[in-house]
Image (cartoon, helix red, strand yellow):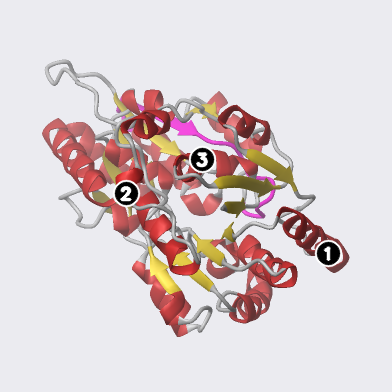
Amino acid sequence: MKIAFFANTDWYLYNFRLSTALRLRSLGAEVLMVSPPGDFGARFAEHGIAWRQLPMNRSSLDPVRETLVLRALVRLLAAERPDLLHNFTVKCAVYGALAARMAKIPAVVNAVAGMGYVFTSDRMKARALRPVVSGLMRRTLGHGNSRTILQNPDDVEMFVALRLAPAEKIRLIRSSGVDTNRFCPTPRDSEIRRPLRVLLAARLLWEKGVGEFAAAAAMLRQQGREIEFLLAGMPDPGNPRSVPRAEVERWQQQGTVKWLGHVDDMPALMCGADVMALPSYYREGVPKSLIEAAASGLALVTTDLPGCREVVAEHGVDGLHVQPRSAESLAAALARLDDDRALLRRLGGRARDRALLHFDQRNVIQRTIDVYNELLPVPLPDDSAFKPDDAEALRHVA
């Protein structure tokens, strides 16, 4: 049994899907990763997983170039002959579904974690692309022996309303999961009061609320509050709404935020933070940084928008909601947590409980395998085959 994963970055596959790949290997499957070139692809060999490079530019709109990419993907799939192809992101889902049909791959799973730039931005380019992308999705996602995995009910409703995929082929799996053993609360001395540490960890896109985060930091600094603002992540040149690196460096030079860049050891970073703020108005699936922070017992501050509301379901109970595009709303919520450390601890505890109940990695991976088994002629083994040594391997995924 061979299963191939196809995504638009090797970073995504390594950080979000390696645990699933390791689980599949423990069940006897061969796993192949496919992505454009990048800095993370070579790491798969350390785990005994093959990686193939595809000369794909995820932001390209050149029809000649894109035709060549599709042909290259067809050739790769025809040579590798996976029993199932699992595609991630809208572009990879469309290309992967088309290529799988041409290469006669017997089963396809398309995972769309959030609707992204094309469906959320009001910019002219996005509005022009929207009907084109919608048409391609209608023609590809529901074809043949396939399923579409979405991460929140809002996206399910949107897919059905726009007929982007047949309702009977859609499956809801909330998030890509979090290892609740690696991401866990650390003891804190409640008697020692220190400056509140607020973290935003995400791709540095304007729609993730990065600008509002910096503006809120400046506001609270002007009020004389000693709050540390940590920004983890890199600009994304492949996205037209990326925050320029020069802007981030300017915030750091002004002392508004401390920019950490890319962080490999996210559990350690979470241990030193008190709050995860993600004032996103991006059309999220379920943000990875929020569920990792929830599992780590951090208080969560985010918007009441699709994807984010899956993690913070009730304002004041398992986190705080803020208004999108409002630095003032974010600053007020953070000031509230700065003043009320009992609330800070209570929200962190509730976030941890919610992570254990809804986002535990083991459950998410098993639900993904259940979707595979709907399509495969010979199902993969069930959960009873997952041994303690497999769990130990997953705990040590970087």
Callout in the foreground (1, 2):
2
Residue that mark 1 sits on: 62
Q: What's under tag 2, amino acid-wise?
A: Asp
In primary-sequence order, the first of circles 2 and 3 is: 3
Which mark, residue 383?
A: 2
Pick the residue in front: 234 or 385.
385
Residue that mark 3 sits on: 18
Is label 2 in contact with label 3 (beta carbons under 8 Å)? no
Q: Identify the residue at image location x=68%, y=41%.
A: 51
Callout in the foreground (1, 3):
3
Callout in the foreground (2, 3):
2
Figure disc tally: 3
Q: Where in the figure is residue 154, as x and y percent of width and height?
A: 37, 70
Task: Provide the secondary structure element on which disc 1 rests.
Answer: loop
On screen, residue 47 above or below 112: above
Region in magenta: 223-241
Spatial CA distance of label 1 from label 2 is: 45 Å
Q: Identify the residue at image location x=23%, y=44%.
A: 356
Q: Is residue 102 left or right of residue 264?
A: right
Q: What's under tag 3, amino acid-wise?
A: Leu
